[in-house]
Image: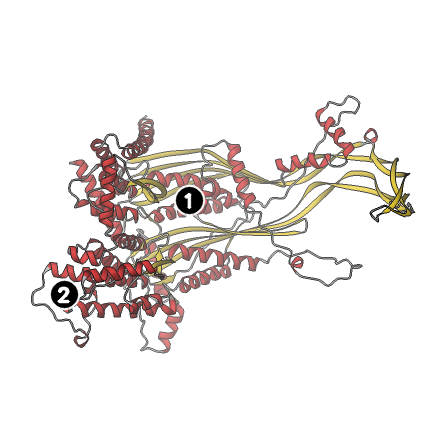
Amino acid sequence: MLKHIVRPKGKVPPFAWLAFFSLLMLTGCKTSVIPVEVSVPGDFNISGVSKIVLADFNTVQDDSRAGIVAADKKTISLVQDMVASAFSQSGLYQVADLDIEKNASEMDPDAKLANRFDAVLYGRLWWQSSPDYQAYPRVDKLEAWRYVKYTDYEEDGGKSYESVARLTTKRWDEYALRYFRARKASLMLSLSLYRLDRNGRVEKIADTFNVANLYYSVDDGAFREDRTAMTEQETSGFLAGVFGKALENSVNALVESFKNLYVVAIEDPLKTDEYEVSKKVEVVRNPAVSIPTELQIKLMLTEELSKQLVNRFSPSKEIVEIPNEFSDSKLSNLLGKGRTGAGAGAFRAAKDYILYSVRKDVGNKIADEIDPLRAYDAVPAYLVPAKDPEKITDAAVRSAAGRNIDYLYALAICEEAQGEYEQALNTYRYLFYLDAPFWTRLFNPPEKEKYAEGISRCLYALRRSEEILEKERALRKALQKTRRN
Amino acid sequence: MNKFFSITAFAGILLAAGCESTEPMTADFTVPPRVITNLESIDTLEIVPNVTLSGSAFQNKAAGKQLIDIVLQQSLASRLYQNGYIRVVDSIWGNVDGASQLDGIFNKKDSLHGYARITTDSIEERARLELDLNLVLNSDEKEMTVENTLADVPYDIKYRQENREIKTDTGRRDQNGHRIYNRTTRTVRVPYSEAAPSRTTYKTVTTKMPVFTIAGKGTLSAKLVDKSGKTVYEKVFPDFACSFQSPYQDAESQDSVVESSLNVSNALVSALADALDGNNSEQPKVEIKRWNGKARLMPTCSEVIAQMIFPALEEIVKDISPYRESRTVEFRTDASASERPVLLLRAKAFMEALDAMDGVADMSSADYLNQGVAYEAIGEYLAAKDAYDEAVRMKPNSESAAASKKRIDAVLADRERMREANAKKLDTQFESDQE
């Protein structure tokens, strides 16, 4: 629905606006969307962490019979580097390299750290690998035949000709052993993240345990692989309900689970190529493939695991499309250009434009009373033509905010798009609870459903924040107290 | 038109007609712990695993024990941290010596980044979760004997007479201009082959092959002692087990084997079928044995351990900590007191919806139902029950309120049963300890 913003001059009679409004609705307006990148919180609340240092990872004791191999120094270093790289690439955290920083400070005594680390990540890992060379019996069906000539006749004219029939002379079962080669590897990594306060006191804020598995096999000439990373969440569903069932069912469930891990077949690469082949020559294809080396497997497992871990620690991003229904064409254009990454500047520009437009309409003094605008500096006086009223009443503020409700909604969208969730939440809340005078609401109808959605999105982005948890705890305490009384 | 007016008008019409307007909502609900009632008494926790390991899988029992200790502690701590209500002390946090070691590492590197020292508060007041795991894990390679019956079906070449219709052009045409043919028949001796069931032979091949097995079984007991030293939770997960074998014979392959055997020849179908059924008196009874193998990628030992104990850990977490679960419930869209709570509920902002309800005067049955939904969503089941009760009291014939009340009553009754079972177990344990 297209809306308009009533300017303070307000000389246009209301019915004219209504007529215009109805006309626009009748002609049908195509609305664009504003893509807003919203944050989906990770599994853990690690707010307040910006620079992480990795304490040297550790491993466990060896037990080769059980297939457990203590990770050697190289593997540990590899995993540490991969984890550090994944955290750095997330763009949300810096990873401190203490050696480089120390060298830099030694080279230049004046060099000072821009910021110090505020979290320590400690991990333990171990590695398992179990090569299998086995065989299993299969029964194949074989057939022998011979060709027998006989005389037949053409239907048209009855001319005789010699025909040949392919006749089975014997069919029998042959027993054979199928050989297969397989390799199963797991990399297990447990990570603990500790936050440091300004006095160097640690507090554990996350603990995680992840397993990445790789399966390879060459079975009867066919190559198969599957790579899975097993997390607590997945595994909880993986075998949910096994308990309480009979042993047989449990085993079947496990067998089924593993069967599923064994189904991803890689297409024979030769099949996808086209060959120019003479009809008389048959192509002999060699489907032999090799199982990756230990180092390759380690690299793949580490990559898989570190990616997954960082996803658990870091918020991920999702794009929410908000209808661009603003009647101010300049604002609409700016928001329409809003994109993530390089286009994010459009939101900044839109924000400046909103702040300028509102203050131009209501004046600086009233603007300062509109809560969401308090976070922003006043625009220069020469850009503010609206005069400040002599007396500022609550009704005047509510009326001014109500008149500019679309601009304020756009401001909330910009704040959300720029990741300023707390500020956006404040703005959405202000709009949601704003009780503008009747006539202002009539011509600038608030869209409370959209504001409620904004509140929900921001709360979700901040879901694990201390503020929200604190609120829940306070409520719980209050309820318990009420019950006791 | 303002949405509020439309909602109010619509609600008014519905109310006048005695109808209820409801809307389903699926959201992640916070579910309170199933057994523990006082979360604050266990919100800082120490996990103490005690593993007894036997069986052939681990040669180095100490290594196996260390591995299982880590799996138990880390996977449980990870689940608890993910829920965000219980924190787990470890060798660094809450442990002054551990933190001091960490401090030493950075100090040695001369990289303390301006921190005077890295330290931790000594957390003396902590609950203890004792996990006793008794695990037997065997990993063996043994020789297995399998039998397969192989059929050898000879075929005889025979001849049959077939007639061919031959048409010869007479050189004449009919009134329509079409050629006129003479039609004659010639007999052809066509060869064919036929299975000879009477001469079919069977032999059974016996093969010895290596089979790898990995099998585990165990029992896990959990005991939770709160900060004051009182045992508040006990649970035993008895006799969990799993086993794997490779190669293995699967049921599907067995069925298909019989079928493919029958496909050997049409003539053999009846012979084999009869042999299998033992019906044909003319044919010798043949016992068809099939063991068609299939390769399996075997799990590693620690994976098997994880698979066995993870479901138990999941249960423990649900018993002691709030957790999240996706649920679908209905709320009322015709709540008359204020539109705000309805809009916030629809947007799944539950805490916010409760805040919005605070200022609402003259709550209706629909308002109370919505309040109950919001309380239920944030895991406050008792408050939700009160709200649903009030909704039913105000409007006894409300279907949605009755359904919500029934739902929460069932959940609370279920929890009460679990808590009673836990209390009973604790009493029994206490009595046996006294003895």
Residue at 81 percent of width and 35 percent of height: B153
Q: Which residue is mark 1?
A: B72
Q: Are marks 2 and 1 on the same chain?
A: no
Is residue A79 something that shows in the picture?
yes
Question: Which element type, helix, strand or loop, lies under badge 1?
Answer: helix
Residue marked by disc 2: A366
Q: Nearer the viewer, residue A58 or B34?
A: B34
What chain is tagged by disc 1? B
- The chain under label 2 reads A
Q: Is residue B125 above or below residue A410?
A: above
The amino acid type, in three-letter code, at marker 2 is Ile
Which quadrant, please, contains the C terminus of chain B?
A: top left
Q: Is residue A183 left or right of residue A434?
A: right
Q: Secondary structure at mark 2?
A: helix
Where's residue B237, x and y in %? 42, 34
Cβ–Cβ under 8 Å for marks 2 and 1: no
Q: Nearer the viewer, mark 2 or mark 1?
A: 2
Is there any visible trace of residue A95 in the rendered image? no
